[in-house]
Every structure is written in C-alpha cells, then in structure tokens.
Image: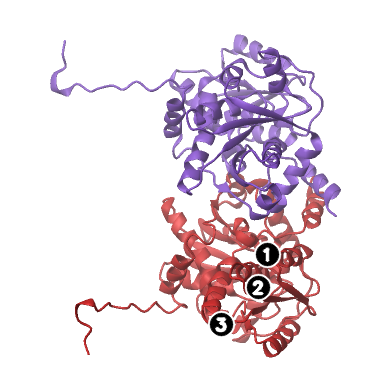
Chain colours: A purple, B red
Amino acid sequence: MSTGANAVAVTEPPPLLSHAGVHDARHRLAGRVVQTPVVRSEELERLAGARLWLKAENLQRGGSFKMRGALLAVERLTQAGSLGVVAQSTGNHAIAVAMAAAQHRLPAVLVLPTDAAPTKVRRIRETGAEVLQAGTTLAERIAVVEELRNTRGYDEIDPYQNPDVVAGQGTATAELLHQVDAADGRLDAVVLPVGGGSAVAGACLATAGQGIDVYGAEPSAVPALTEALRAGGPVTVDAKPTIADGLRPDRIGQLPYDLAHGAVTEVFTIDESAIAEAMRLVLLHARLLIEPAAATAVAGALRLAAGGRARDIGVLVSGGNVEASLVASLLDHQTS
Amino acid sequence: MSTGANAVAVTEPPPLLSHAGVHDARHRLAGRVVQTPVVRSEELERLAGARLWLKAENLQRGGSFKMRGALLAVERLTQAGSLGVVAQSTGNHAIAVAMAAAQHRLPAVLVLPTDAAPTKVRRIRETGAEVLQAGTTLAERIAVVEELRNTRGYDEIDPYQNPDVVAGQGTATAELLHQVDAADGRLDAVVLPVGGGSAVAGACLATAGQGIDVYGAEPSAVPALTEALRAGGPVTVDAKPTIADGLRPDRIGQLPYDLAHGAVTEVFTIDESAIAEAMRLVLLHARLLIEPAAATAVAGALRLAAGGRARDIGVLVSGGNVEASLVASLLDHQTS
C-alpha cells in the first residue's frame, strides 16, 4: 500500500568496511571526537629529508585514535539494548571503550595484560570501569573475555574484529587526507603502527583508490604482521619485550589481515633503539609527547624517507599515553 | 588635476598599535606562520576546574610565537633597504629574527645573555646568523646592540619597542579568539606570559573592546611588570634565577607598559615550583612539550581558575624551546 506524497526515500548506509563506510563513520563522529591537528616540524623534516605530516592523535580524547572506533561500537551496542561491554586490550582501546561506555552509562569491564602501562590502568579506573589483568598474551586475555561474556551477558568489543572499530580507526587516516588536501598538499604514502592491525586496516579502507601507498611499522620484537604476510594468514609470534606497549598483541586479527594483506606496500620492523629515538625526536623537535607505539610509525616514516621512495609522508601518531618515568629515562640516556 | 575614471582610492593601513592594526598584521602573516592548534585536555581541565584553551605556539615555526612579530619587522626593514639586523633577546625573539632574516637573505647578529639556553643558541647558529653573548642583564645586551648599530649600520629589531613586533605578537591572541569563536566557545579571560611585555601588550590590542579580561603571569623571581605597575612605570628589578629563561628580562619595555598598564586586570607572580609543575602537567596531560615561560602562563591560568573568576580561559602557550635535560629532571623529580 502506497503512503502517497509523504513517502520518504530511505538511503541504506554504505557497508562499514569500505571507503564510503569510513567516510560515513567520519560523519557519525563529527563533533564527538577532536579533529586533531596535523603537525609539521621544520627540524624533523630536515632530519628526515621528506615532508612529514604528523596526524596528532596523541591530542585525541582518551589520548589515542582508539576513541574513534570505541565511540561508534559502544553507540551501536547501546542502541541495541546492551547490558554492558567487555574488551581486551593492551591499553588504549580499553581506555577508549571505558570512556565511551561511561558516556553512554553502560557498565564496562576491561581486560589488560599484567604488564600494562600503569598510566593506562589508572585512566580506565578513573572512568568508573572495572579492570581485570590477565597474563601477557592475547590468548590469555581472550579467555577472560569469553568467560565474562558467558557469566555476565556483556557484549564484547573486539579491538581488531569489530567492523565499527576498524572503520572508526580508519577515520583518523581519512581526516588526515582531508587536512593535507586543505593545506594544498598531496601524500605519497601513509605509515601506520601495527599492533592487532585495526589502524592499518582502517587506513587501507580510507586510502582505497587514492593512489597513496600504505606502510605498516611494527616492533622487531613483535613482528605479527610481517610473519602473517609470510605465512599467508595470522600466526601467533614469539613476542619479545618492547617499550611499545600498545603494539604487544602477538597475533594480527583475521579481519585486519584480510583487509591489509593485498593493500599494504611494505611492513617495517623497528628495533627498540629506533623507537626510543623517534619518540625523543618528536618530543624535542615537533614538541609532542607521543607513546612508543606512535613513535614506531614515525621511525617507519624516517626509514621510508631515507629510502627516497616518498616525499610527502602521512604518519598516524596514534597516541600519547606514556609513563613519565619512560620519558625521563629516554631523555637522560640520550641527551649529550 | 583629475586622473579621471581611472582614479583609485588608496586605503591607508590602520595604525599598527590598535585592534585593527593587529587584524591587519594577521592578514599580512597569513600563510607565512602556522595557524597553530588550540589544544584542550579533559584531564587538565578536570584538574583546573575550568575550560583551558591552550594556544599551542610551541608548534609555531621557530618554536615560539615570536616568529610572528619578527617576520613583520624584518619584512618592513628589507623593503626599506636595510643592510642587516641586530636584536637582543633571551632566546626566542633571536631565533625568530634569525629565521626571518635568513628567509630575506639579510645578515643578522643576535645578542643573548651568557646563560642563554644552549638549544636556543644552537638553533640561531643553524640559520647562519651570528651570535654574541653578553652578560646576564638587559642593560648589558642593549649596550652591545648599540655598538653594532653604530659600527655596522645594522637596524635594531627591539623585542619590546618595535610596533611590528608588538602587533605581530598580538596576532597569536587574535587568532586564538577567532579559533575559540569558530568552536562556538567564548573566552572570559586570556593569560599571557610576561618577559619584556610584548605578548601581554599585543593581547591588550587584540582583545580591545571584546569584554575579555587580560592577565599577565611572570616568575616571582623577575616581577618586572608587577613592580612597574606599582612604581607607575618601568623599573629594573633585582632578578633572581628562574627556569623560565624566556622571562628573564629584568625590565618591562616602555611601549608594552604604556599599552598594558590600564588594560591588564592582574599580574600573577609564579614561583619556580609552580612553573615546573605546570610544565609537567601540560606534558603529561595535554601531551605538549612547552618551555617554562609558557608554563608560567599555564600556572597563572590555574591560579585564575582556582579563584573561580573565569570559566573559559585562553592561554598563550608561547613556546617549546626547552633543554632535554630540564624535561628529564622535572620528570625524574616529580614522578611517583
């Protein structure tokens, strides 16, 4: 039966995991996340020999770009009548989910490794959310999440497998592209830090069809994407200690792998001293406090620039949640 | 004799040292300085109990807002056929003049105190400019500048008395007001660090007629504006050591005094531990590396917020040129 002249055309949203889906996610987030600045540093660019467009998500709410995906995912679950949310994370995804859940008055339990950065644990507790610490491997955290889903009926917000999360993380790269364009620039490449893979997967969606190369950067200590690409699928790697606590997941997510494996040009593995040096360079030259995960991407960009393969490089400076003592020790050791 | 239909109305620029003059200066600078972001931090605002709009001029070219005035002054002298420029400064004005002069291929000599921050001296030398270090007082530096003017025929760019410099520094506050407005905000007050006085004087011009209170903040160790207001004119104060190397001038300029003395609501004097604590808070919560001079203004804003007299406070985060060793020692001493 026709509703006559008042009929309204209902437009379906695009699939989340597409270039259009990321743009749709960006519109959903407008005014709810900070449009973080893109910072350039003449000194840093002189050292790099390339233009570095630093997307300063260390200035994002919750101190990292993970706020983007968490807000979208929590919003969807709230609308669906969720009783509460549970998520495992090395830290930043947990902070973001805790903040988003508090905003929606939804109970939240976050599962972190026992060696999580104390600053991150403190920030989660400040939101009123519950923190559980379990082991140091992804598998140990996943087991606890599974138990909470069963016992409490909470919904999981997986940091790598949830489509809202992956599309949401992609909005950081989409926004960077928009800002570079507005400044009359043009990126040859973007470099993303790789932990569980949501950043690089989101970037693959955001850059699709734009002629921009996507590079990943991960600690040599935890080469989860490098090994997955070699094996033709996600594998659990033998993780060694790294200061990049945000990049400790020892296995890439299946969804990020599927999105990234044909789209990423190369993955750089970065050793600990290069991570520390990049963190120090950005602090002293670009005057931004960034966490080691973000510094890993900066180190990747420096490597890319040194190879002469890109003149304009966008870098996802993913977060700034870092221990004061770590910053002090970096400066103590390396000042001359 | 009439030139007929082709007559063109020539509009005189407004007087530099006026509200309209600062806006005119902002247009002259468009595209030549960074429109630095205004950074807000939920954590910092929770501590402050007020909204703090941090104008992040630590991300400016040359690492401080002094680039603004220096570019305008050097441009005018270049157009007038200057042989070279000379300036005295505790550091940031010198970096800015050196960079602006290099851009205009003009010789530059900068006169700094013997205890100037080594990072600042290095940055000036990197531009190819000449650095002379003379004593620790303003009077000692002025004597050297005078000699260079006479022997070399160079033009002085005084950091406090030059109208281009004062109007140029005012553009940082004008831009902040514009950005807050664009974010649907409304400032009750702005807080500026006080050294020789150009920042606060420029802010008085930028805020004229806007119903925004202007506050100064200076180290208790060098209360140059506080004492000048008490004496009814600039006086040389007995300066004690301060980590705020950018605020060491021991006498306020006459021009800044004239602009500020009827327009400034109050001047806060900040002790050394409060400067250090503000620097640490901004680093760890707002994730910006700022120099102690800028932290002095932040500490002033925290004092203003604690008094409950302002809900929305703009702060000129004047610069970020700071020694790595100082940052390390702040973090070492104060982490718990």
Judging from the image, what secondary structure is the residue with disc 2 in?
loop
Query: Residue A138 occupies which quadrant of the picture?
Result: top right
Q: Amino acid at mark 2?
A: Gly
Q: Nearest the camera: A69 or B63?
A: B63
Q: Choose top left, top right, bottom left or bottom right for residue B162.
A: bottom right
Q: Earlier in the sequence, mark 1 or mark 2?
A: 2
Q: Amino acid type of disc 3?
A: Leu
Which circle marks residue B195 in the picture? 2
Residue B168 location in percent, x, y? 52, 70
Q: Nearer the viewer, residue A163 or B32?
A: B32
Separation of marks 1 and 2 at Cα, in angstroms: 8 Å
Q: Which mark is residue B293?
A: 1
- Could you tell me which chain the residue with mark 2 belongs to? B
Q: Which mark is residue B255?
A: 3
Mark 2 neighbour density, 10 Å: few (under 14) some (14–19) many (20 or more): many
3 or 1: tag closer to the N-terminus? 3
